[in-house]
Amino acid sequence: MADNTPVNSQITDAVTQTNVKVLGEAPAQAMGLVYQTMAHSISLSMQNAMQTQGGLQQIGNAVTSSACKMILDTSGGGMGGGGNKNQ
């Protein structure tokens, strides 16, 4: 119990217990915030990696289609063609 003061001792005890509760929970809340921030950072890096992989896939598709077009243009018109374009 609190010492004799002009304030009711039950009031001072309630305030003291509330302060102790807040100080006791602070480390756990701080670590929870750290873990939540770390999980968010990891998820953002995974999203960036996925976006990069999708961009590289688009580049690969563009290169493949360009190579196929070049092959078809030089072969003279497709499968079994081999003909001359000037005819």
Image (cartoon, helix red, strand yellow):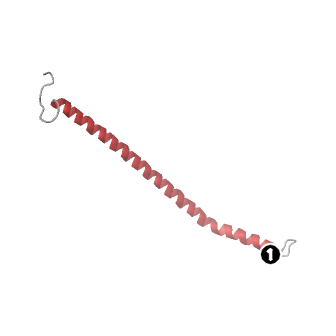
Residue drawn at the location 84% of the way across and 73% of the way down = 8
Q: Looking at the picture, how far across and down is residue 80, in whole percent?
A: 11, 35
Q: Looking at the picture, how far across and down is residue 35, in whole percent?
A: 53, 61
Of the residues shown, which amino acid type is indicated by label 1?
Gln
Question: 3 or 78, which lies in front?
Answer: 78
> What is the quadrant of the N terminus in the image?
bottom right
Q: Looking at the picture, how far across and down is residue 23, in whole percent?
A: 67, 67
> What is the quadrant of the C terminus in the image?
top left
Total numbered labels: 1
Residue drawn at the location 26% of the way across and 35% of the way down = 66
Task: Give the image quarter of residue 70.
Answer: top left
Residue drawn at the location 68% of the way across and 67% of the way down = 22
State the residue lying farthest toward the bottom.
Answer: 1
Q: Which residue is mark 1?
A: 10
Position of residue 84 relative to residue 53, above or below, is above
Task: Give the image quarter of residue 60.
Answer: top left
Residue drawn at the location 85% of the way across and 71% of the way down = 7
Q: Considering the numbered disc 1 on the image, is that residue within a helix, a strand or a loop? A: helix
State the residue lying farthest toward the right.
Answer: 6
Question: Is 83 left or right of 21, judged from the image as shown?
Answer: left
Position of residue 17 relative to residue 81, above or below, is below
